[in-house]
Amino acid sequence: MKVTIRVKLLLMILIANSALVLAIYIANQIAFEKSFAQYVQSNAREKMHTVIVKVVETYKARNGFSWVKHRSPELSEIIQLYHQVNGVESNKPARRKGRPPEYKKGKDYRPKRGPKQEFDGSEQRRPAKGGPRGDRKLPPKRGAKSLPNRLIFKSPDGQLLIGKATMAQAALWLPMYTGDDSVKTRGQGDLIGFIGIENGTLVTSRFDAMFAKQQEQQFLHIALIALLVTVILAIPFSKYLVQPIIRLRRTAKRLAGGDYEHKVKLDRRDELGLLARDMNKLADTLAQNQTARQQWIADISHELRTPIAVIRAELEGMIDGVIDTDEAQLSSLYEEIERLTNLVDDLHQLSLSDRGALTYNMMPCELSGVLNRCIDKRRSELSLFEVTVNCADKLTLHCDPQRISQLFDNLLQNTMRYTDVSEEKNGQLSISVTQTSEKTQVIWQDSSPSVTSEQLPMLFDRLYRVDNARTRQTGGSGLGLAICTSIVEGHQGTIRADLSDLGGLAIIMEFTH
């Protein structure tokens, strides 16, 4: 069975709220029991005030609790006082104050008899109601929860003076101080011990027990009502949260099917609204990539078709005898094949870069040596250029020397193709390399012609040419600067174009350390 996100969200809300209600219920029960225990203790202390006063007075008079251990008359008197306070009848028979008057008259004394009563059988002795014992109450069963009728004493250090350990487990302990025998000093003075009431922690008052039971039931009802309200509110709330997700899912499904024109319309300012805006941007990006891919395929087809068409035409002319098969024609044919080979190599380099398959063998490298080797290799082609290199001899960069040489060679070819030179006016090339603790910067500048500011960001696009005048005869394939971008980014650097101080184009590269 597939569980939807709405069901999961609903269950999470219910579980969280149930846990919260349960925690509040338990905390309330604990707080209520603690407060009620304090109330019971306070009530018991008020009720036992006269007993505590008597104990403190006896303690002071006897200078200790020795009278407790020896079952003295003082202890019996305190127990009798405790029984009176709690309304418990004493189990001891009443003490006789004297002999009956009949005993004083001697053993031969007989009470006076009245007139002899005749038994006529009209009256019979009736049995008592309720059975042989009549209305006499039975003694309470052992272990029954009745009013406490035994006291326990212990010293301030917790040692039992009278009573058993089993009696002390459920006892209510009340501290006694030397000032408890006076209203003004009540609860003050030194602690002399504790008086314990057996089963004193039990709620013996019918009204107190009823109040505690009602409080427990009322809060239980409140907790159940809160859970019910949570369920009622969680259903529409989960729907409100899940509905935008469903719409986003539908949009993602349409994007996966190639429909990049569909947009999500969510007027929200939360994370779901941000996700909707990001998905709309994704749709725009996918549409642009699709257009660029289609344009890229069309441009590649055009670039490949042109040299192939030239080669085919020249070969057909040679076969038909229209074109002479001489050294000049063969050189022209070789140039077209070379141009086609370079184009295929450039495309291969870009495809490797796109797939991340270009390998870089990083090592410390002196940039001045790499630059000088690239310039020396093209010294004859740079005969009409004034080249200025400003780079320290010991300036090193952690890079791949082969890829950096390819980068500089592509920039040299770009400068030689698009810089105006003549016998009367030489072109200019300035290369400046500076280094700080954070980065190494290479600034490559050439002389006129330049480009417009609007064209600067597009120079690194694949197969881009500034104008139609730069044909394939004078220019390259339009992939040189795109390859430069791949190499610089492979070294975790940045590359950008700007207007040169020499009147042409400036390429600025920065490599972070």
Image: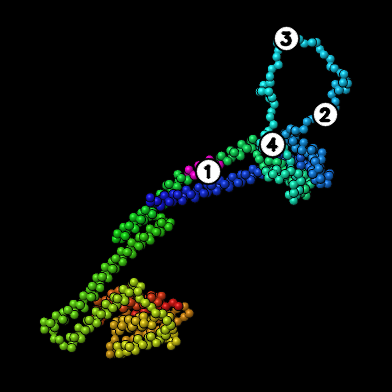
Q: Secondary structure at mark 3?
A: loop
Alpha-carbon neighbours of circle 2 within 10 Å: few (<14), some, or many (≥20)?
few
Q: Nearer the viewer, mark 4 or mark 3?
A: 3
Q: Could you give the CA–CA distance between mark 4 and mark 2, rounded to whole angstroms? A: 28 Å
Q: Which residues are magenta?
A: 219-229
> Three-letter amino acid code at disc 1?
Ala
Look at the image and tell me whether residue 24 can be seen: yes
Q: Earlier in the sequence, mark 1 or mark 3?
A: 3
The residue lying at 40 percent from left, 57 percent from top is 273
Alpha-carbon neighbours of circle 1 within 10 Å: few (<14), some, or many (≥20)?
some
**Is residue 407 rendered magenta in the image?**
no
Q: Say which of 261 and 397 sits in front.
A: 397
Look at the image and tell me whether residue 240 can be seen: no
- In the rendered image, which residue does mark 2 sit on? 96
Q: Nearer the viewer, mark 1 or mark 2?
A: 2
**Considering only vertical position in the picture, is 364 above or below 53?**
below
**Considering only vertical position in the picture, is 149 above or below 416?**
above
**Considering only vertical position in the picture, is 149 above or below 433?**
above
The residue lying at 34 percent from left, 87 percent from top is 375
The residue lying at 55 percent from left, 47 percent from top is 24
Alpha-carbon neighbours of circle 4 within 10 Å: few (<14), some, or many (≥20)?
some
- In the rendered image, which residue does mark 3 sit on? 120
Horizontally, residue 445 falls left or right of residue 125, namely left
> Three-letter amino acid code at disc 3?
Asp
- In the rendered image, which residue does mark 1 sit on? 223
Q: Earlier in the sequence, mark 4 or mark 3?
A: 3
Q: Nearer the viewer, mark 1 or mark 3?
A: 3
Residue 300 position, x and y percent, is 25, 73
Residue 406 position, x and y percent, is 34, 81
Residue 147 is marked as 4
> Three-letter amino acid code at disc 4?
Leu
